[in-house]
Image (cartoon, coloured by chain):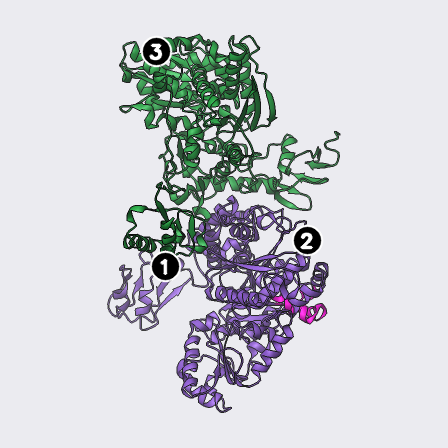
Chain colours: A purple, B green
Amino acid sequence: MPANNLKEIKDNYDKQYANITKKIIICAGTGCVSSGSMKVFEAFKTELAKRNLNVCLKISEGCREIYLSKSGCQGFCQQGPLLSIGDTFYTKVKDTDVVELIEKSVLKDEVVERLLYKNPADGKQYKTTAEIPFYKKQTRFLLQDCGRINPEDINEYISNGGYESARKAIAEMSDAEICNFMLDAGLKGRGGAGFPTGKKWDLTRQSKGHKKYVICNADEGDPGAFMDRSIMEGNPHSVVEGMIIAAKAIGADEGYIYVRMEYPLAVTRIKTAVREAREIGILGKGIFGTKYNFDINIMEGAGAFVCGEETALIASVEGARGMPRPKPPFPAVSGLFGKPTVINNVETLANIGKIMAVGAQEFRKMGTKNAPGTKTFALTGHVANTGLVEVPFGTTLREIVNEIAGGTTGEDGSPDQEAFKAVQIGGPSGGCLTKEHLDMPIEYDTLKAAGAMVGSGGLVVMNKTTCMPSIAKFFMGFTQNESCGKCVSCREGTKQMLSMLTDITEGKADDKTMHTLEDLANVVKVSSLCGLGKSAPQPVLSTLRYFRNEYNEHIQNKNCPAGACKALAKYTIDPAKCVGCTACKRACPVGAITGEVKKPHAVDKAKCIKCGACMKACKFNAISVGG
Amino acid sequence: MTANTENKGFVYVEGKKVAIENEKNLLEVIRKAQIELPTFCYHSELSVYGACRLCLVDIEGMGIQASCSIAPKDGMKVTVHNSQIREMRKTNIELLLAAGHHNCTTCVKTGMCKLQDIAKKLGIKEVRFKQNTEVKERNTSSHALVRDPEKCVLCGDCIRMCSEVQGIGVIDFVNRGSKTEVLPAFGKNLDDVECINCGQCVRICPTGALTSKSEVSHIWQDIWNPGKKVAVQVAPAVRVALGEMYGLKEGENTTGLIVTALRMLGFDYVYDTSYSADLTIFEEVNEFIGRFEKGEKLPLFTSCCPGWIKHAEHCYPELLENVSSCKSPQQMLASAIKESFVQEGGKREDISVVSVMPCTAKKFEAKRPEFSKDGDFDVSNVLTTMELARMIDEKGIKFLELEPSAFDMPFGFKTGAGIIFGAAGGVTEAVVRFVLGKVAPEADYKPITKVLHESKSLKEMEVDLGGGKKVRIAAVNGLKNAQNLIADIKSGKKQYDFVEIMACPNGCVGGAGQPAITGRENMKQRSEGLYSIDDQVQLHKSQDNHYIAELYKNLVGEVGGKKAHEMFHTHYHSRQRIKLKPEEAKGKTNINVCFGSSCVANGAKKLYQETRQLVKEKGVDAKVHMTPSFCYEKCTRGPVVKINDAIIEKADAKKVAAELDKQVKK
């Protein structure tokens, strides 16, 4: 099928689809797969076959009745496995539910109510995604097709309008026109720094050289981030399409997708997408029937976080050790193999085709003046609904946490608005935001001013049981492990900061430690070679900014207000509640508890190793752990 | 303003206007303004690395930047020192001090260590950070070099020196973050890899992480052994560099002081390696003329440099027959000393020879088994120039106040030709003087040659021997440059009859045993120092060294004769671990199954067995020679089997059987 006639492909697909009466979509995103969605898929296959129904797994000639499709991530990961039958949206589906679902929801138009989503806050049930607050409050522009279409069928992508933007860019637009269009649209890079995409392309376009490259940075490595992964798994063709347009804009004939090997499903799907595109002439020589050549290589990263930094990524593609180099020269001038190179992240590229389809003005209607469009966030932590969400820039944290995520959850996992403590945004390079930021519109500049960053979009909500120095320590441990070891400031600085944070959480620090920590953080922030090092002290600096008292409590009173630092825990027995049953005394492995039978016991703090065995043994709630 | 600077503008360094000339980066411009910014990882001869974070400056409009990585632009306003920059530099040095165990008092690099120097200059009085408790082991596996990871600041200078300048690349970073270390591949020892012991890594190492392996204690023991005579020989390049350790200028001649000092140290005989440099010319020219007349095994490559020899054994086994079979001057002189001692009635093992060399690879050369007899090495120990200074200091000798004295005879006599061996191109010039001296004995010793090309690293010339005979010569220094030259020779782009190769940039004067004092790296003056000694001596052509004529008359016999071969020539062996070209048996059908990693992963071993079986079944066992081989670089199309000239990709037993039938019939 020649790719210069996308309409033909679409018409053909629509014709083949016409006889489908029921569409069943099972989420095959990583979250749902790990909670068993493939078992559900197999059960459907078997049970439908038993009933001699016509089932299509991929739309082709002669399809009729039932289309059983696997989709990419639908975003509502906490409720998985997710399943839609027609419009009806089911959550937490198990393979044992399949027979009932077929009998009622597939064969008749009944609803299996027990599998509908129930809002934990008010107990209300919803039948379609359009009604569920989690989805209703989002603007799913980029993720529109993600979780809806079959990521392994290029025809389905095309029938949904896919590759039309790429065709137009290749066949009808000049490189300058594309760059100008992107400048008009005002898209900013979604990988973290927020550099205007149009400007990046235009700079690379103007760099002299016959050979240029487009690189898709799919080395998403922030703890708690899975936006790029979901896009690659759910709609890989949107990434390929973005790369084709970028290639035309700068004059490249070769591209690389650098994807981390820890994303096996994303790797498979992106490989399939590239193969499919090549088969119908969307990649390769003379694409879309023009004279233009462009092809994509896929390179799997070996698991270094630093390879998300563009110069380190380039080094890695070139076969060298993944270490950043000083900039300038920027990749736009001298990138891969010394040639002008555009590096965009997955989400940025996935936006391109969509933006061209709706037009720059329409795109600008979403988001803010400085940051048009939407941003995806990987929502995790102490909230009712974790998952992948997409909101326009300018949305407040309150809207995301309370409305989409269904509010903060307390210690027992149930919604508790009062339990909210902070949001960590932007991963190890980002910072913490507090209650006072809840009504701040989220955007590149506002977050920067508050000491955080959009980053790639990890968003971790934390309740009051979270200790902020411990959070800083966690992220510092991560950066320390992932530092490439090249520059002194990052290599040794992160190590020393980690050691000081450990001392603070273990009650071994004094005021001098705090001063040194803060001084060092300020040095590493400026003195490091690359973005990873420069942002490594962010978790320390932002928690110090908003939670200095918590640090002081750890240092001066050797007390962890959140009760999270084990080394600072103080076990005490309430003499009023203690009946002297000796259960705790027997449970204590180090003999730290003394007391006579039927008389209140006491803990010897010098001997106590803070294992908590006494607390578990006590049947009278007499033992408490104070900070 | 000169025409040169006209278009490039000015940088304002602390308000002072500094012209931008040909500086590649801001750091060089600032240094030109007499401000020495501290650095570990910046060297003009290496690529910009940007890791030490010490050359930070504040640029108006750009903020704090590492000046090594910024191109100077007209109008740039730069502050090189303020409270923020000071804090950052101090912090970075403190971090390094906390990360390693620098034990300055017991470190050989003390007084010449950049870390020590910078810490002192920045006024660091305390380290605010916790001392790293993990201790990494020193590696002393190599004969020449010692690696101490505890003192490494991970500036990567050694790595870039090894790969960018020397073209070898035996070391690189391993592990990540604070666990990063500099190691040979797979954590192997330096003596298990292609390291040529040139020690350029040692020369550039800012701290004591890479040092030469000292044999000083052994030498004292020999000196104090009443039953032993100890002879010492001094290489040409040493005399123009040792003075630097005592504050003299680069290139200043301290020959007489060195001889006196060596006698005071207790050496029995003090000889000059320049003597055997002259001797080398006799043997090498004889060898060259022989080959030149027959037109075989050309170009002849020189063999004085042990770094180049080991490299050739690793990487150019096919060129080994072109390499002169002459031993290096160090080994020739040791042979001559030992042999003369024996001739005069002494026992071989009762005299030991110590050499003072500008070179770390000489330590390795001295330990080559072919240069020993029954476990007694011709050269028992090698001192570098810096190690000699340490011995002089240890004994408390006031070097600069010594009365100069002369070498012992006969092995202390030399001509200027033997002196200039220490400079790049010197061996070549000595050869030319010798050859032209034979053609026209009365002519000036300064050779009249046609210089075709001359750069810092390569000199190409043509010498007219008369009668239409012209000798094409190249002299190259720096191993990477040598590799490029060899590539040109192999491709036919360049043709020579004689090629001098010195592994170190600038030749022996730039050896790793020479003083490496921060900020004093002027090799040119050392070379000039050697040429000025050449100017001062009476004789300039090796054939004029009458002590050599005597040696041949009394001990050796003929130049290039049997005894000369025993004493002054050697042989080389390939050190290639894997033969790239598999052995082939003539008159047989040769089958090679690729055993490279990729082919093995694709079932090459099984296929090898199947092919064996096939050969047996077909009864062609006697007609077939079968071996596993190495990579054919067709990894995506493996397994690969080669039968005679036919290469079978994605091979299986069926394809092999079909091709075997065809080839056996031929």
Q: Is A503 situated left or right of A231 in this image?
A: left
Side of B547 where B225 appears, left or right: left
Q: Amino acid at mark 2?
A: Leu
Helix, strand or loop at mark 3? helix
What amino acid type should be assigned to the residue bearing mark 3?
A: Leu
Task: Tell me, yes or no, whether dots 3 and 1 are on the same chain.
Answer: yes
Task: Residue A624: name its quadrant.
Answer: bottom left
Q: Amino acid at mark 1?
A: Lys
Chain of the residue that carries numbered disc 3 in the rendered image: B
Q: Residue B130, relative to residue A104: is it above or below?
A: above
Which residue in the structure is indicated by mark 1? B654
Dot 3 and dot 2 within a common chain: no
**Of the residues tagged 3 and 2, which is closer to the observer?**
3
Identify the residue position indicated by label 3 in the image. Answer: B555
How many residues crowd around disc 3 within 10 Å: few (fewer than 14), some, or many (20 or more)?
Answer: some
Is residue A371 a member of the stretch shown in magenta?
yes
Gap between marks 3 and 1 measured at Cα:
67 Å
Between the C-alphas of marks 1 and 2, the distance is: 56 Å
Mark 3 or 1: the one toward you: 1
Front residue of A223 and A6: A6
Residue B124 relative to residue B61: left or right? left
Report whether residue B10 is seen. Answer: yes
Residue name at image x 44 percent, y 55 percent: B637
- Magenta residue span: A350-374
**Residue B635, position as x, y percentages in the image:** 44, 52
Tell me the mark number nearer the camera, choosing from 1 and 2: 1
